[in-house]
Amino acid sequence: MTKKEILTFAESELHTELSAVELLQVLVKKFPKKVCFSTSLGIEDQLITHFIFENEIPIDIFTLQTERLFEETDQLLIETQAKYKQKITVFEPRKNKVEELESQKGKFSFYDSVENRKECCAIRKIEPLNRALENYTIWVTGIRAEHSENRQNMPLFEWDEAHQMLKVHPLLHWRAEEVKNKIKKFQIPYNLLHDKGFVSIGCKPCTRAIKEGEDFRAGRWWWENSSKKECGLHN
């Protein structure tokens, strides 16, 4: 389908009155075997994973193994696959690219500048993501509007020009408490770091717990002076 046809479908069929599950079901009906979901194993992503597996919605789920994740995150992947008896595909960075970066700039070059940090993200996240998204038309994410000021006005769906595909955010307008309540109700495994002040969990060297009153994204790349701190996955 062309970009115009996909957007025409989205504008007529995807709306906020649909539940998250209904939205996912509409997508796979229209785009069989062309819908994927990227999970970082964060709390929102765990809820979407539950919706997909429990309702047997044929959506491929993948995650990015940056080789710098928290032990709790790695363990959660194992627990999630065991609970649902389903596979989550793992994409890793090109080892030669990681080795090249570390040999030239060291293992912690990302602390030195925004450019260096983005270079590391590009190798460990963006390149693997590009491979993961190949051959799909729809990219489902766990983005919520509450996550950051930059996401306050995001639409339910948007065209990703870089990947030439439609991005859909089923939990966009959910509140944090709604997500937590569902996690508890359905006994969905979640990252135990969430109980220790970590809200947005990424690579271990680049993530810290936030203090009361701090912005949701304050724990990511906290040493950078920027109001827009993104790794490039959802720019």
Image: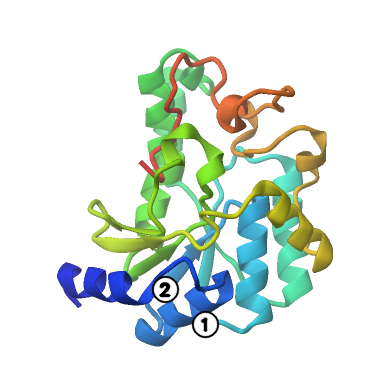
User: Does label 1 or label 2 sit earlier along the sequence?
Assistant: 2
Where residue 69 appears, x then y in whole percent?
A: 64, 41
Residue 166 lies, in percent from the top left, at: 32, 63
Residue 58's tag is: 1
* Farthest front residue in view: 17
Q: Amino acid at mark 1?
A: Pro
- Up/down of 71 relative to 205, above or below: below
* Location of the C terminus (image quadrant): top left
Q: Secondary structure at mark 2?
A: strand
Q: Answer whether labels 1 and 2 touch (C-beta < 8 Å).
A: yes
Instruction: Say how the picture is coloured.
Output: rainbow
39 left or right of 227 in image: right
Percent x, y of residue 12: 30, 75
Residue lying at 72% horizontally and 50% vertically, measured from the top left: 177
Q: Quadrant of the N terminus?
A: bottom left
Q: Residue at x 39, y 29 (%)?
A: 118
| Circle 1: element type | loop
Residue at the disc numbered 2: 35
